[in-house]
Amino acid sequence: MRCQRCQFENMPGESRCFKCGSVLSGQGVAVDVHPPRMDRWKGPFRAVPRWIRLRTRFGERLRVPAFLRIMSGNAALGLVLSLIPGLAQAVSGRFREVRWFVFGWLLLLPAGIFFYGSGTGYLLLGIAVGLHGWIAFRHSLMKEHAEIGQRIFDFSMLLVVFGLLYFGVRSTLLGDFMFGYTNLTIPYQNIESGDMLLARRSLSGAEDLKRGGLVQSTLRMVGRGRRVFSGGARTIVQIVGLGGEKIEITDGAYVVDGRMLDGEQYPVPEWLKGRKIGPIVVDVNSYFVNAVYNVEGRGMQLTAEMVGQACIVKSSEIESKVIMRWFPLKRRGFLKENE
Amino acid sequence: MNRRFSQLEFGDRSDKEPGKAGTGEEIRDEEYFHKQAVRYWLAGDFELALRHYSRSLEQNSSFYPGWVGQVLMLIELGEYREAAVWVDKALEMFPEHPELLAVKAVACARDGRMEKALGYSDNSIGKDNVTSAVWLARAEVLLNRRSNIADNCVSKAVSIAGEEAPMVRLRAGRLLNRQGDYAGALGYLQKAVDEFPKSALAWYELGRCQAGLGRSEARVSFEQALKLRPNWRVAEEALRKVKGRGFLRRLFGR
């Protein structure tokens, strides 16, 4: 019996070719000859990972000069290249080794930013930094340092360095944006105490600020000698009075130039409620702000001078203007202007 | 193997009813269905071609061109994983068969698994009696890796093709077309339409190539393909695109 493939003449009765191992005749042997077929719905689902596979072969596609490829094996240069996760491996043609780590980093970083302000967000960002550190560690240091203690030290140092790096990048690239927690509750703007708000530095110019706007400023310590109030660090406050206006607090509401403001839009904080204060005249280039202070000493007499000292901020002291509620997620959205 | 395409009739007589070859009823053996499958492939109907390859294997499951053809049709239909599964099955019957290894390399390359593709291609090229199909598969893998020596593989495939040269030229043209090397593909495809004037696939590929080069003849080629296979959706779409292209887009070939 002659083999169709190699033309070797086999002994009669053989099922496979003695020379090449091919099947000699299908007759008498049940072989399924109908190939499996792909369900149509699977097409797009397979196309996406294929597209990624075809376009993420950096090591193969990048035309990297040979000297750079060799030098990328050096730990120091590897670390520098690893500032962009996976670049060192891509240059040395070993991107596949870390592709899933890079993929995870690409997923976790935006997810962490999205959830920034919550514990989940911090956790995701932490894992993203950890993955970045691991990618760099795998390329540059793992082969050089074999001892487990040394490896743990290297990795820990990388985490610290990358943590600082991320902080620096955030300050550089997103320096215009600031996050801050508020301890105001303003029903009109759907803001509750403890919300994280997003603010922009570039909008803190005096011409952009209107009554009802939220701004970030550092509260002063008032009555330092007697420790009457303690202000916080940087906090979010609401503008109530503009420069040149006369502010009074009466019946649990603000009165500006004789006009009473809506309590939903301009709620008087607890430490000023039930008191009659004013009138206080706001200086030009200054604002009267709605701020929450901790008052030390119950029943203490608050004078207009003390309240003015606590609540009037100069325009130069305003650091940024709040543009949106960032967290909690269900109330995320841009703020509506009061006026 | 070399006899596979030698008795095909692509000329004025190629549009005869399958099974009636003039002098009487043809024997419906594996060779007959294989020829039918190739005819359908030349018409660009890969689904029917696959069915006929399967029928050829129903006649004789040890007919390995049928297995190779099935896998190639699965690849044409974009079912790369199924092609890989099926080629594994074929390799159980024909261990270390260079053409089967080569088509597995093509399936892997199209699916974006380049390392595997290169491995299978290396394996196939190292065997004895390497055919032009193996060199074409090698060329495809290397073109995916943007290697400069891929052109040599195509030339080698054509030079050793012998009687299969017309078919190999068409395959080579399609391969270069697919990789965007329209200038390289044009020569092969022009010869292919001379050799297979009744092949809708050859005309369609020539049209694609001409369209890629910004040539106005692309329209004629697509129309010819549609004349040979009316209502071919892919060709209709290509023709519609070519008709809608302005002077500047044709000038820059995009």
Image (cartoon, rainbow, N blue to C red):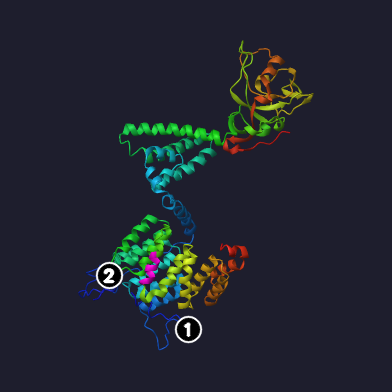
Q: Is residue A86 visible?
A: no
Query: Where is the N terminus of chain A found, in terms of image quarters?
Result: bottom left
**Mark 2 burial class by Cα count in 10 Å: few <14, some 14-19, many 20+:** many
Principal SS element in the magenta part? helix
> Residue at 37% across / 45% down in the picture?
A70
The residue that mark 2 highlights is A23
Q: Where residue A252 is drawn, which disc sits there?
A: none
Query: Where is the C terminus of chain A found, in terms of image quarters?
Result: top right
Residue B149 on the magenta segment: no
Where is residue B206? Give x, y as percent.
50, 71
> Residue at 41% across / 39% down in the picture?
A77
The residue that mark 1 highlights is B12
Where is residue A110? Give x, y as percent.
52, 41
Where is residue A72? Give x, y as percent.
39, 43
Q: Is residue A24 above or below residue A133?
A: below
Q: Is residue B12 left or right of residue B54?
A: right
Look at the numbered disc 1 and give the secondary structure of its residue: loop
Where is residue B169? Give x, y as percent.
42, 71
Residue B159 on the magenta segment: yes
* Residue situated in front as seen by the camera: A338 or B121: B121
Q: Is residue B95 left or right of residue B251?
A: left
Q: Chain of mark 1?
A: B
What's drawn in magenta, residue-wise? B152-160
* Residue situated in front as seen by the camera: B83 or A319: A319
Distance of label 1 from label 2 (alpha carbons): 38 Å
